[in-house]
Image (tube, coloured by chain):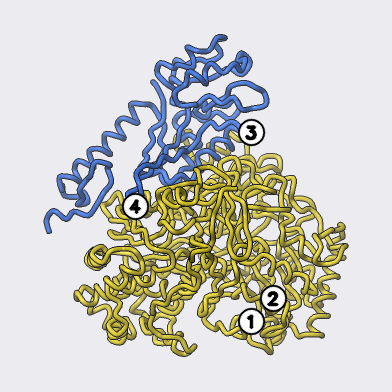
Chain colours: A blue, B yellow
Amino acid sequence: MQHGFYFDMDLCVKCHACEIACKTWNEVEAGPRWREVVKVESGTYPNVKAMNVSMACMHCGDAPCQKACPVSAITKRAEDGIVVVDQNTCIGCGFCVWACPFNAPQLTSVAGKMQKCNFCQTPGTERPLDMPRACEEVCPTGAIKSGSLAKLAQQNREKTARRLGANKGMSGFPSVVLDAQSTFGPDTSGK
Amino acid sequence: MTYQEKKLSQRIAEIKKAEVVKSFCYSCPWNCPTEVYVRDGKVVYVKGNEDAPNNIGTRCSKGMASWWITQDPDRVKYPMLRTNPKGERGEFKRISWDEAFDFIAGKLKDIAKKYGPEAVALTCHHDPNTQFYRHLLSDLYGSPNMYAHTSGCEQDRRSACLTIFGHVFPMHDFANSKYIMLWGMNMLGANQGLFESRGILEAKKNGAKVVVIDPSFTETAQKADEWLPVQPGTDGALALAMCKVIIDDNLYDREFVAAHCEGFDGFRDHLNDKGYTPEWAAEICGIDADTIRRIAREFATTKPAISAIFKGSGYYTNGHDAGRACYILDALTGQVDGVGNLHLKDWAPVGNPVDIPDDAKTAPKKDPLHVAMGYPLAPDLPNSRLPEAVIDGKPYPVKGLFVHSTNPVMSDPDRDRVMEMFKHLELAVACEVLMSETALECDIVLPETSFYEMAEVRQGLWLGAEAIICQPAIDPVGESKPPYEIVQGIAKKMGWGKHFAYKTWEDWAATATAGLPGGLEALKEKGFWSAPPEYNKVGKGLETKTGKIEIYSHAYADAGHNPYPEYVERSVHPDDEYPLQVTHSKLSMHCNIVTQNNPMLMEICPENWVEINSADALKYGIRDDQMVVIESPKDNITIRAKVVEGLVPGCVSIRHGHGFGHWAMGSVAKGKGAHSNNLMEIHTNPVTGANCYNECKVRVRPA
């Protein structure tokens, strides 16, 4: 069953706790950033918008890093789809960095080997898959979820259904209207 | 118990092969309850306490990274005594604790004899462990000058709360609110009270509207439904005009106001007499009159609602009345202490750690400094005026200073004057974990334990009554000692040892927690004790003079100030020579001076910067990411510029000036970013005594 992350940018406040939890749990030294929160701004004063995205390895279904690796150091685990790199085989050439669309592979460590998010499977400190990842556990607003893609899809469907219900003014749902950016405002349609 | 039924903390402890210690975090004053995982005397992981309502198991980046302090090679490990004259950068030699206690006790006796005990003051950070210093220096020694850090923080808010609601620290029931109006309060960006941050997002999910009034497009504005880019220092005008709209349109809560508020009729007349109309306010604050009316009406007709402030509407010489006007909006609409409102936080029954009998106490013979300085309504020391007391002896001499978990050399305005002040002290004691810039100006530096190495019992900052406990997870680093042992050592040398007779921390903690259900043992086991929030305390009588919500403030009237909030312009305005107004904003991953020697946090944010609107950047030839020189009439700094859209033109926003730019402290912190406090002249709020950091004008050019 393929595992991965779900990220809700409506909830991320760019506090960076996920990055620190990742480092602490997996005992990553300063330099490589397995996870990083990035802020994107748009618009002109005073009509400004911004969003925050916390990014790590996406554990892609058809992982470009794996294809690019000349020494087959990167494997995709059959049982859970997690993409891992074998530190003993990696030669630190950086092809994976070029191939990855998310800049997930990190080559900044002194050892010169590639490292990246391994879904908290660092040897000696592996988190069973029914636990939250360290980044998910620490997030004060619940912006990051992890799990099998089937579970994440189900959660997201429920969230969308609630929004649709809310939009129809169903009882038990808050009375709100939606705009295109999925932000909420008071329902003024009845006034 | 099956594997799946185990609590997360048990499973983590098994994976990390660690013991779990229930504790709390002191990376910021919000003190989230935590679990510390310890293996072989080392902290190997930290997590939020999943049962605690504050953070339900989560952390912020500052707290998550805070374990670094337990292995920071820059920790102060031994008591250190200055060997060279004051005024030069401090050189120190290692001494024993016994020598340190002798030195301090000798100086304290000397100062009491020459100037009286009132000449000794303490500044700290509302840290309950400083209660031990208060018992020593106030109860026994006889100084009334035991102060915290608030004048560099939310002094204007605190003063507004106290004078209107008789409550020192209201919190916010955001999660249950339908309309949230935040004045200069970047809850999500500062990200300290995690349940409050979460509450804003939960409220939004439930259909609440969030309005942010701030010159900066903050992290909170980013999530808001509306951002009102107000001109700096004009929040008071905007809030007063909203009050007038709500009264004129009969949208105020007549029943609530009649039953619980003092001085409504006079306030209505005051608004009329002053002509605080939306059109008047629009000219001042830059928000058009129609928007002011619309927001005021929305606020008054959507319930429950919150109008909340923190620091941003302060930091100006008119910040006290801005704060009062923002809170009067809550009072007029009856939105005080109900579900989804500003919450007059409940307190837990936490007592003093030691009992000093009355006959052992020494009553001070002089007024406390804030009263003697002419700021009787100041909730804390107006510390921008402390140099005057030390250097000029006004209103009376201060010759001894204990500095505990504050760093005035970095944090107070006009750094030159603060450093000059230390030269004139006969006893300056720094209780420190790192050799801070303030420690370098002191006579003696006492190495303190970090919060991972000591115990503490305090009020939890959650809506309901809450007590939290910090327990030592590891041994003290070097010879460092916790405050309760340091005070015990000094007290013994002063002949007061019998009042601090505890042998272990549990001895005094049992005294402090005697009134809590379950006492100390239950607290140690669970890490916190909490009760559900109590609502609607307004009718039961508040701790104001009249017992009511004082729109007409008797405290203000008695102190000779206008009992109603008025709008007076701030003191410093940009001009042709210095065309930009300074504002300040925080960073989520740094907290004043606490976090800058942490390599994990410095990796995310290694320096501070100044933000400037793109229109101003074009005018002054500034490119994004370029180093620039900011000049005020007093000093200049070189700092990185970020060209942004989300900032009112005509001002700059310096990110986190009180922390960055260390010139001495910490191998990681030193030399990173710019320290901006020397740009400021000293401006003190005339009522609250707050430091007015934003009363500063500058010009900017490429470096």
Q: Which of marks 4 and 2 is in front?
A: 4
Evaluate if marks 1 and 2 touch, with contact meaning CB atoms under 8 Å apart.
Answer: yes
Q: Are marks 1 and 2 on the same chain?
A: yes
Residue type at numbered disc 4: Pro
On screen, A33 above or below B382?
A: above
| Circle 1: element type | helix
Residue found farthest to the left: A190
Residue type at numbered disc 3: Glu
On screen, B33 above or below B563?
A: above
Going 59% across and 46% down the picture, which residue do you hit?
B607
Whichever of callouts 1 and 2 sits on the residue coming sooner in the sequence is 2
Chain identifier of the residue bearing label 1 in the image: B
On screen, B631 above or below A68?
A: below
Residue underneath mark 2:
B121
Whichever of callouts 3 and 4 sits on the residue coming sooner in the sequence is 3
Residue underneath mark 1:
B369
Near mark 2 (Cα within 10 A), the count class, few <14, some 14-19 or many ≥20, is many
| Circle 3: element type | loop
Q: Nearer the viewer, mark 1 or mark 4?
A: 4
Residue underneath mark 3:
A29
Disc number placed over residue A46 in the picture, else none: 4
Residue B20 picture quarter: top right
Q: How far apart are marks 4 and 2 (CA)?
A: 47 Å
Q: How far apart are marks 3 and 4 (CA)?
A: 41 Å
Going 33% across and 86% down the picture, which residue do you hit?
B263
Task: Report x, y in % for residue B215.
Answer: 41, 59
Residue toward you, B238 or B625: B625
Going 80% across and 54% down the picture, which residue do you hit?
B479
Q: Is residue B142 visible?
A: no
Q: Nearer the viewer, mark 3 or mark 4?
A: 4
